[in-house]
Amino acid sequence: MDNKENNFDARKEKKLNKNNDLKMDIDNSTSEGNDSNKTEKEYDLLNIYISNENSITFFGKKKKKLKLSSFGFCITENKIKLKKVKEIKFSLLPDDDSDLFDDEFEYLSKIKPKGLQNLGGCCYMNSTLQCFFHIKEFTDYFLKNKKNIKKKDGLISKGLLDTIEGLSKNDTKTYYSPIEFKNNLIEVDDSFQGSGGKDSADLVDIILTSCQDELGGDTEFPNTALDQRNESLLFLDLYYKNNKVQSIVLDLFSFYLRIKNTCFECGIVYFDITSENMITFNLEQIFNYQMNNSGNNSIFNKRIVSIENCLEFYSFDNSIWENAECKYCHKKALTFSAKSFATLPKYLIFHMYRGKDEKFECNVDFYEHLDLGPSYYSINGIKSEENTKYTLCAGTILWGSHGYGHTVAFCKHFNGEYYIFNDSSTYKTNFNEIKNQKIYLLFYKKNN
């Protein structure tokens, strides 16, 4: 018994010493507060950041990371104050404009901007690849899952891995040749051979579809006999019960649209849920929509459409269906449909469709920061999106006109600066220069 008590006392003393040492670490991390030359304002720059409920990090002049288990109790604001850490401002998460969330991708900031060699008629391919490469989570996934990706049969994912590895190498080369990706792309779909009328949007579609199949599996929903008049029931069944297969595509790009249908014969309202990876805006239709809804048509002489009008038109695009059979009264009647976001993705891709052959000449008034709040509809019973704000991170630009031209990419590089990626050449740019270009694709990242 005495030995057990002695062992218990020894463990207790060891734990107390450990906590005392920890207290000293905390006090030392703020010891600069004892310097009379420091001002109170400087103390406000210090933060505590709890990451994944496993560790606590002190940020300031000195940075120290400690495991939560070291404290021996649950970390709360009051208990931290009891440790006499008075000079530190407490926060569960960093400020919205902080880059602390990107700590796990810090190694990417060492990568220098690098171009892609044009292998003949594939400027659209190079620009699209640059956009995907500059999505941190996407590149990080491929670099950290090399072995698993190489074991699979996926041609597109293997080609992407080769390109991502090539662009990630900090060697003396200023560009990389995406020959493996191009060969694999043609093997999957030979219509991508040569220029062939393909563009950035076509490639985005095949990249996302192929990566979903190759890395995540099929996610088609089974047929359901649920009453579609019960919106929450329909959404819960489709989204929460049947969406079991996850992938990098679903995690980063996929979102759900809520479609509200109204039958003009019986007046019954019913709902549909559909999954998408990209939104396509038909600029010619949207321009005409603006013209018809404006009392002053002269302001549209320069052919400019706003991103707000794009989203507004998209909500009601093809909204009136004639002779559509109602699922409830079974009569062919006029049906009205309206779309809205039911979920919001981490990355949202906008496609500015300008026609297949002769491109519709039109500029897009878009912003570096975008709020999708007006286009989002919260469904009862489903956890609502508290954050609806996005920041521009990449896109493609069309140079030339009337169906003939060249495609380049603009991307916010891992160092936080915008670059133009014109095949094998790269150079710095800024948003004001990008804003005046003829945009084709826009990639927006959801704010942390």
Image (cartoon, rainbow, N blue to C red):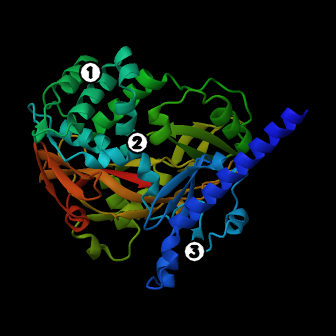
Which residue is painted at 24% across and 17% down in the image? 187
Mark linked to residue 170: none
Mark 2 or mark 1, which is nearer the start of the sequence? 2
Most extreme residue toward the right, as rendered?
Answer: 1
CA–CA distance in space, label 3 to label 1: 61 Å
Q: Mark 1 Cα within 10 Å, few/some/many (few <14, many 20+)?
A: few
Query: Residue 150 versus residue 6: which sits nearer the camera?
Result: 6
Residue type, label 1: Asp
The residue singled out by tag 2 in the image is 137
> Mark 2 is on which residue type?
Glu
- For the residues labelled 1 and 2, the Cα–Cα distance comes to 27 Å
User: Earlier along the polypeptide chain: callout 3 or callout 1?
Assistant: 3
Q: Is residue 80 above or below residue 141?
A: below
Mark 3 crowdedness (10 Å alpha carbons): few <14, some 14-19, many ≥20: many
What quarter of the picture does the N terminus occupy?
A: top right
Q: Quadrant of residue 221?
A: top right
